[in-house]
Every structure is written in structure tokens, then in C-alpha cells.
Image: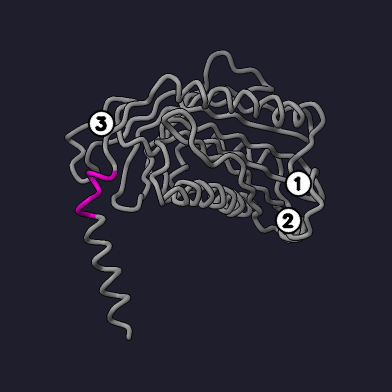
Amino acid sequence: MRFFPAAAWLLCAISCQTLSAAVMPILHLDPKTLQAFDSYVAKFGREVVKPYTDSGKLSIDTSSCCARNSAYKTGKAFLEAHENGDVASGSIHHFTGMMHIDHGTIEDVRHLMEDYPNYPRYFKPDVTKASGTLEPDSIPSDDHFMAKMTLDQSTLWFGVRYECVYDTHYRRIDENRWMSKSTTASVREMQDVKDPGRGYFPEGDDHGFVWRTNTYWFVRQSGGGIDVEVNSVTLSRPNITGFGWFGSKRSHDAVEKMLRDTRTAVNALH
């Protein structure tokens, strides 16, 4: 009775490995796809970022959902799905994650986020290398960094590695509120993780697992700790028929892990 499910799973795994190249061809990032993504994040800026900077309102403030508030008040991550579907020759995956961290401070989060050399320790195993440079246009209320990171991810069939450049602003809005906005200035996928000497695919002509990512952190002092909200908006290849759940799950899990890793790092400071 146990053999058939195991054998079927093994056959499926072998078939997926064999067909992976055919199922996941190299794609080109179309300007219309990028335009759809830019329009989406512009709308997000108007509807979410601006209200936070104006009044400090977070997503948790707009819901009376008992499950959400119960998890949030006990320090657990609560996630909410937004757009997770196809656009012009691509797909957008957007999740919001929320968490309260007791005893944390805005300064703790700022310190962690700007401590790029230690990202491989804070966010292992996803980040394997990181560095950041404070840009000349930075001011006390707005730290502007250009950061380089090596990211490792696992897909359904094989591991992928990216060399990414992020343009990030860390803004202190007032004594009780802080936020950051990070956008990908460059995303390059390595052709073969097992053979780095082969180099990278041309940018925008790759498997399309990640073409763009915008990440927004909102942090405010509250109840002897901090309320933390992270929004991740990712542009990738179109969803494969029957596997649309995978892109959503990958984004969901990434946001949840970012929150958990941040909580662990903040707690280690106290």
C-alpha cells in the first residue's frame, strides 16, 4: 500500500527533472510587462505608502479580523495576499506580512537593515553575500544605500542564484515611525549554479523567476515594542498552467521568513 505513492512520487520527480528545460524555457522581459509592474507599484505608493507616511496607518489598523489580530498580538507573523496573477507576459506576486516585536526599537531595525555585511548571518541561507555603500545624497532622515547581494533560491526543479543590486532609502519619518523602500536596479541569474564560470544570462533574458522586486518596510513604536509591516511586490515570468500556486507560495514563504529572521535578529540585540 505504501509502495505506489512513493513510486509515483519518484517517477514524477524524475519526469520533472527530465522535462524542466522544456517546461521552463528562457524568456524575454517585455517592456509592456515592466510597464504593468511599474503601474502596480505606483498605485501601491498612492494607496499604501502615502497613508503610512501621512498618518502612520498600517494594514493591521484597517481590519477587525479576529484571527489576524490574535496572531499579531502574540508576536506571530500574519500574512495577507494581494495581487498574485498574470499581467502582460509576466506575473506579479504581492504579499503583506505583519508582526509585533516586543522590546524592539526603530533603531534596532535600522541597524540591522543597514548592516549589509552580516546579511548572510541574519537572512541565511537565502543571502550568501552582501555589501552596501552609503550614497553621497544621504541626509540624517534619509539614508540612501546601493547594495549588492548574492541570493540563492530553490525552485520546483533546480536551484538558482542571482547577483542583485538594490537601490534603497531608509527614512526616519518622525520619532515613532520609520520606513524603507528597496527596488532592484539589477537582477542577473547565474547560468549554472554548479559551474559559476559559465557566468550569467543577459539581464531580462533568463528563466524569469525574478525580474523585479520592490520591498517596503514600515516600522512604528507601539506597546513597548515595534509594529512591523513588510510588503514584497515581485515581477516574474507568467504562471505555468497548473503551477500558479508555486509563485504565490514562494512569495508567501519569503515574506514570512523575512519577518521571522528580523524578529530573531532584533531579539538578539536585547
In primary-sequence order, the first of circles 3 and 1 is 1
Q: Nearer the viewer, residue 259 or 129?
A: 259
Q: Nearer the viewer, residue 20 or 74?
A: 20
Question: Which labelled disc corresponds to residue 200?
Answer: 3
> Residue 229's x, y, as percent?
67, 43
Q: Of tags 3 and 2, which is closer to the observer?
A: 2
- Magenta stretch, residue numbers: 17-23
Main SS category, magenta section: helix
Q: Secondary structure at mark 2?
A: helix
Q: Establish if 146 lies above or below 91.
A: above
> Residue 242's x, y, as percent?
41, 51
The amino acid sitting under disc 2 is Arg
Q: Is residue 26 visible?
A: yes
Q: Residue 238 lies in magenta, yes or no?
A: no
The amino acid sitting under disc 1 is Ile
Do labels 1 and 2 touch, CB within 8 Å? yes
> Residue 212's x, y, as percent?
46, 30
Q: Is residue 148 visible?
A: no
Question: Which labelled disc corresponds to residue 68?
Answer: 2
Query: Mark 3 Cα within 10 Å, few/some/many (few <14, many 20+)?
Result: some
Q: Pick the quarter of the image with the N terminus.
A: bottom left
Question: Which labelled disc corresponds to residue 60?
Answer: 1
**Which residue is pictured at 55% across the width and 29% down the height?**
182
**Which residue is pictured at 62% across the width and 31% down the height?**
180
Q: Mark 3 to mark 1: distance in Å?
A: 41 Å
Q: Mark 1 to mark 2: distance in Å?
A: 8 Å
**Which residue is pictured at 62% across the width and 49% down the height?**
266
Question: Which labelled disc corresponds to residue 81?
Answer: none
Q: Mark 3 to mark 2: distance in Å?
A: 42 Å
> Residue 239's x, y, as percent?
42, 42
Q: Establish if 90 lies above or below 18.
A: above
Q: Nearer the viewer, residue 130 or 255?
A: 255
